[in-house]
C-alpha cells in the first residue's frame, strides 16, 4: 500500500495555472500533489556570446528552492555565495529537456530563460519544473509570434517529466517525499510528447534492481507522461482562448 493510498499507476493531482505573473512573457504555477513550482519564461533579444551571429537562439533554465519550501528553513544559496551541485545539475536537466523540443534555428537570435522556483517541496520538484517549464516556454513563444518576432513555431513537440520508483518491491508512478525517501530505486523520466526519450536518470538506493523492474517503471512513466502532456495541452488551450 502506498502511503498516499494511490494506485501504483496513479499520478498525484496535477494542476497547471497560467498567467500567474504579469511581467514574464510566459508563466505557469504547477502542482504535483503538495509540490508547487513557479515557472517563469523571460525573453531576451540576445544570445550568449558564443552564439552571436549564427542566427540561432537559446533556451536555458535556472532552478532554486525557496527557504521554506521544505520542513525546515534552508538558507538561500545566494547568501552562501554559491549554488549547490544539486541545483546546478537540476537546472541543466531542465534546460536540456526544453531545448530538446525547440528548433533553435527557427527561434532566431533570441534567448528564453525559464526560471523554476520551488515554493513547496514534496518530491518531484525537477519533474514538475520540466513539465511546468514547458508550458511557460510555450506561452513565451506565443508572445514572440504575436509580436511578429517569429513567423513559425519553433516548438517541435511537448516535453514532460515524471518520477517512478520501486517502493516495497513494487514499481510505482510519481513518487512523493514519503515514497522517495524510502524507495529501493528511483528514476526520473523525461519524454517527448510523441514518446521519444529525452533523458532518463535512475539510481538503485540499496542493491541493484533487475531489468524487468526498470521496464515496469518505464511503462508507468509512459502512461504518466501521456497524462501530463494532455494536461499541458489543456492548460495551453485555456490560456490561448
Image: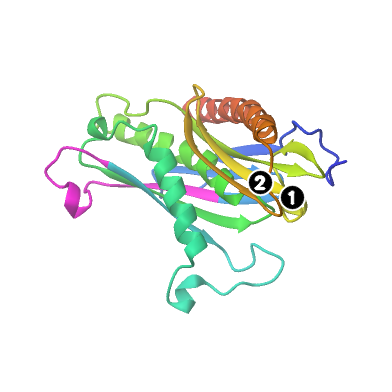
Q: What percent of the width, then of the height, locates residue 47?
A: 22, 48
Q: Which residue is mark 1?
A: 183
Q: Which residue is mark 2?
A: 186
Q: Residues within 10 Å of mark 1 (few under 14, many from 20)?
A: many
- Report if residue 54 lies within the magenta region: yes
Residue at the far right: name it. Answer: 1
Identify the residue at horizontal 84%, vertical 42% (top origin).
Answer: 2
Q: CA distance from mark 1 to mark 2?
A: 7 Å
Which residue occupies 35% across, 34% down? 141
The residue lying toward the viewer, choosing from 137 and 17, is 137
Instruction: Report the front residue among 167 and 154.
Output: 167
Q: Nearer the viewer, residue 151 or 181?
A: 181
Tell me the quarter of the picture where residue 212 sits: top right
| Applied colour scheme | rainbow
What is the magenta range? 38-57
Tell me what residue is drawn at x 51 percent, y 61 percent: 86
Amino acid at each position: 500500500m502506498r502511503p498516499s493510498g494511490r494506485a501504483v499507476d496513479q499520478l498525484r493531482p496535477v494542476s497547471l495555472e497560467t498567467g500567474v505573473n504579469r511581467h514574464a512573457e510566459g508563466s505557469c504555477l504547477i502542482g504535483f500533489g503538495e509540490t508547487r513550482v513557479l515557472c517563469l519564461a523571460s525573453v531576451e533579444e540576445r544570445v550568449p556570446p558564443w552564439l552571436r551571429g549564427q542566427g540561432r537562439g537559446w533556451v536555458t533554465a535556472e532552478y532554486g528552492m525557496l527557504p521554506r519550501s521544505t520542513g525546515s528553513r534552508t538558507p538561500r544559496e545566494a547568501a552562501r555565495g554559491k549554488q549547490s551541485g544539486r541545483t546546478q545539475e537540476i537546472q541543466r536537466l531542465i534546460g536540456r529537456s526544453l531545448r530538446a523540443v525547440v528548433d533553435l534555428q527557427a527561434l532566431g537570435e533570441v534567448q528564453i530563460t525559464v526560471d523554476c522556483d520551488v515554493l513547496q517541496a514534496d518530491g518531484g520538484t525537477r519533474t514538475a519544473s520540466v513539465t511546468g517549464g514547458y508550458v511557460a516556454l510555450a506561452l513565451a513563444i506565443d508572445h514572440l509570434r504575436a509580436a511578429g518576432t517569429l513567423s513559425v513555431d519553433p516548438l517541435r513537440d511537448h516535453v514532460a517529466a515524471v518520477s517512478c520508483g520501486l517502493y516495497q518491491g513494487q514499481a510505482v508512478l510519481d513518487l512523493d517525499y514519503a515514497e522517495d525517501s524510502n524507495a529501493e530505486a528511483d528514476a526520473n523520466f523525461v519524454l517527448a510528447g510523441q514518446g521519444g526519450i529525452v533523458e532518463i536518470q535512475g539510481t538503485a538506493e540499496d542493491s541493484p534492481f533487475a531489468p524487468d523492474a526498470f521496464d515496469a517503471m518505464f511503462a508507468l512513466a509512459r502512461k504518466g507522461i501521456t497524462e501530463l502532456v494532455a494536461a499541458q495541452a489543456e492548460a495551453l488551450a485555456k490560456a490561448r482562448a
